[in-house]
Image (spheres, rainbow, N blue to C red):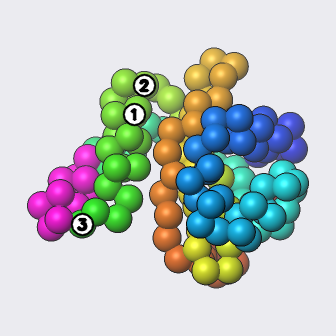
Amino acid sequence: MDKSSSQEFFSAILSSRILVPYLEQNAELAELIETPDHPDIRYFENPAAAAELAPALRHRLSVMVTKNISHNVEATKQLVAFMEAHPDSQIHNVTFNCRTQHYGVRCARIGDQVHVICVMTGGHNPDELLGGSLQ
């Protein structure tokens, strides 16, 4: 993802206010979002086709519901619903990787607009698992 695209995704995420609930819980996240080129913000270069991801995510959601797993279930529902409504879209991931927690914001570009879909949370991701940042 080129620099202008990463700036565009960063701006869309901030203006969507999707991270506000997490900012109240994690002061480090507030530090990360002060600048779009912070080294712990990862903009992944290769988006995934919604039509290709949807079947696997529908299955994952089914397993989550069956096993009563609540972690990220609402975000997964939002992502599946978006992909079903926009099967031709490309899903992008921007990860805000704090010391103890990460926040993976799923977005899509449709035409000239960036749509912010949901936030997937989890523990800190070691740098070697994330690969290089594409700033």
Mark on residue 9? none
Q: Measured from the top left, where is residue 102 in percent x and y?
A: 59, 68
| Amino acid under disc 3 | Ile
- Mark 1 and mark 2 in contact? Answer it, CB < 8 Å: yes
Please provide the residue range marked out in magenta: 58-68
Real-space Cα distance between discs 1 and 2?
Answer: 5 Å
From what the image shows, is residue 26 above or below residue 74? below
First reached walking from the N terminus: tag 1 or tag 3: 3
Q: Residues within 10 Å of mark 2 (few under 14, many from 20)?
A: some
Tell me the residue that label 3 is attached to: 69
Residue under label 2: 86
Structural crowding at the residue carrying mark 1, measured as other residues with C-alpha within 10 Å and reported as few (<14), some (14–19) or many (≥20) = many
State the image quarter where residue 12 is shown: top right
Judged from the image, the secondary structure of the residue bearing numbered disc 3 is loop
Q: Which quarter of the figure is the N terminus placed in?
A: top right
Residue at (25%, 53%) from the top-left corner? Answer: 61
Compared to 106, does 102 lie above or below? below
> Circle 1 — which element?
helix
Give, as a three-letter code, the residue at label 1: Met
Q: Which residue is mark 1?
A: 83
Q: Please say whether residue 133 is visible from this viewpoint.
A: no
Name which of mark 3 and mark 2 comes first in the sequence. Answer: 3
Name the secondary structure under disc 2: loop
The spot of residue 76 in percent (x, y) is 36, 50
Q: Disc 3 vs disc 2: which is toward the camera?
A: 3
Q: CA distance from mark 1 to mark 3?
A: 21 Å
Can you say whether 32 is above or below 20 in the image? below
Distance CA(mark 3)–CA(mark 2): 26 Å
Q: Is residue 13 left or right of residue 71?
A: right
Residue 39 seen: yes
